[in-house]
Image: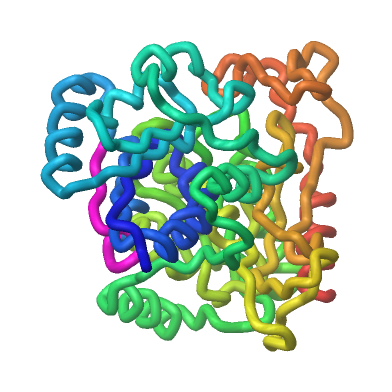
């Protein structure tokens, strides 16, 4: 018999929300209703989930957090929610969870919470989830659910796209002739400038793919995305306004983009450590022998789209597209880091992770050669 309902607090970057999709599926096996608190930048993806994966979405608004939190606490109590989980581990978002007898409040283990002291101050009687497992973030978040006796649930990244979204995506596929064994999606953006491979490199990559490898190239991205000052829109107009490239940046929204990226339309998707490649290349579990699926060392079968992911200031062990088979995704790293680069490659900490300081000075992503990315794409295409 399923439990009543649960509210999950997880406020972060857009790409981070992809990592908890399997956890939300797991929670749906135990609870009748799942509500979700997300950041403003995550809200468009969370809205897609409302078709069946989650039952309510609330938005964390830092500038008006106290007022927003009061509304969420009131709504949660009105819905009779008794279980609350802070998956991200940021103490201040604990304000979205109410106080009272009979409520089960779970915060991350001391080693997993960025603001454990604040989280404990906000909810002194809260229980702790088990310490997260080492490895990919998907497995880490799923391991935290052991505190609710949720064990070994199948990993799924399926999103409940509306019929309108599915039809719009299919119309684009037919209109632009996107199906094919050499159709490649490029997603040049990221919320953090330190993770962006230079736009001129993406342009050169597109030229080689089209002229030398006979590929159909599709440019993906958000036409308005405040965290990076509408970077995708600006570079799409500057670098991709001409040539034989299908530019979808100003023609689609996040719903259609998510549908296209996860659908298998593209033979390969190329991107930075960001939402697009997380969505495109993360492997869900499937039945043994499913066409295109592969068996991982854990004995389970997984299927995903082929992706090439460009990494430098973040750790691919934790943040690459989820792939227990180690086959669907190819990671491309810099040949070397600039001498003045301050990225700690042992602790995987970059002090300029979220700003533009190093972009024009010692940008590590600039040290990924175009030829190296071309080779990875060709290999993924089987050329």
Quadrant location of the N terminus?
Answer: bottom left
Height in image: 197 above or below 54? above
Name the image quarter holding the C terminus. Answer: bottom right
Residue at image x 74%, y 39%? 134
Above or below, comparing residue 45 to residue 103 in the picture: below
Image coords of residue 228 (percent x, y): 43, 32
Residue 26 percent coordinates (x, y) = 49, 60
Horizontal side, residue 175 vs residue 181: left or right: left
**Prevailing secondary structure class for the magenta stretch in the rendered image:** loop
In the figure, 271 relative to 182: above or below? above
First to last magenta residue range: 50-59
Q: Which of 288 and 232 is in front in this view?
A: 288
Report whether residue 206 is seen.
yes
The image position of residue 89, as x and y in percent, is 48, 28
Q: Residue at x 57, y 42 (%)?
A: 144
Q: Can residue 238 be seen in this view?
A: no
């Amino acid at each position: 018999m399923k439990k009543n309902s649960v509210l999950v607090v997880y406020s972060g970057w857009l790409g981070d929300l992809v990592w908890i999709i399997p956890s939300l599926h797991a929670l749906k096996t135990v609870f009748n209703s799942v509500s979700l608190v997300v950041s403003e930048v995550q809200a468009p993806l969370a809205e897609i989930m409302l078709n069946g994966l989650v039952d309510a979405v609330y938005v964390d608004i830092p500038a008006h957090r106290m007022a927003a939190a009061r509304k969420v606490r009131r709504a949660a109590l009105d819905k009779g929610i008794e279980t609350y989980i802070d998956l991200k581990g940021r103490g201040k978002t604990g304000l979205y969870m109410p106080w009272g007898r009979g409520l089960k409040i779970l915060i991350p283990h001391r080693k997993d919470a960025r603001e454990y002291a604040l989280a404990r101050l906000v909810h002194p009687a809260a229980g702790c989830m088990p310490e997260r497992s080492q490895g990919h973030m998907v497995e880490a978040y799923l391991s935290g659910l052991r505190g609710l006796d949720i064990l070994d649930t199948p990993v799924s990244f399926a999103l409940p796209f509306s019929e309108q979204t599915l039809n719009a995506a299919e119309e684009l596929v037919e209109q632009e002739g996107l199906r094919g064994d050499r159709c490649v999606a490029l997603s040049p953006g990221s919320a953090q400038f330190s993770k962006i491979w230079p736009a001129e490199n993406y342009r050169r990559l597109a030229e080689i793919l089209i002229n030398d490898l006979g590929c159909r190239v599709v440019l993906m991205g958000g036409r308005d995305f405040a965290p990076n000052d509408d970077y995708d829109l600006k570079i799409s107009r500057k670098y991709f306004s001409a040539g034989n490239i299908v530019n979808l940046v100003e023609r689609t929204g996040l719903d259609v983009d998510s549908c296209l990226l996860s659908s298998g339309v593209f033979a390969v998707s190329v991107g930075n450590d960001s939402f697009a490649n997380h969505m495109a290349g993360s492997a869900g579990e499937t039945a043994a022998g499913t066409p295109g699926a592969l068996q991982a060392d854990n004995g389970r079968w997984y299927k995903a789209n082929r992706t090439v992911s460009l990494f430098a200031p973040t750790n691919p062990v934790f943040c690459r597209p989820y792939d227990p088979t180690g086959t669907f995704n190819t990671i491309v790293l810099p040949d070397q880091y600039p001498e003045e680069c301050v990225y700690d490659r042992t602790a995987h900490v970059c002090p300029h992770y979220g700003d533009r300081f190093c972009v024009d000075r010692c940008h590590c992503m600039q040290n990924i050669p175009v030829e190296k990315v071309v080779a990875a794409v060709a290999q993924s295409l089987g050329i």
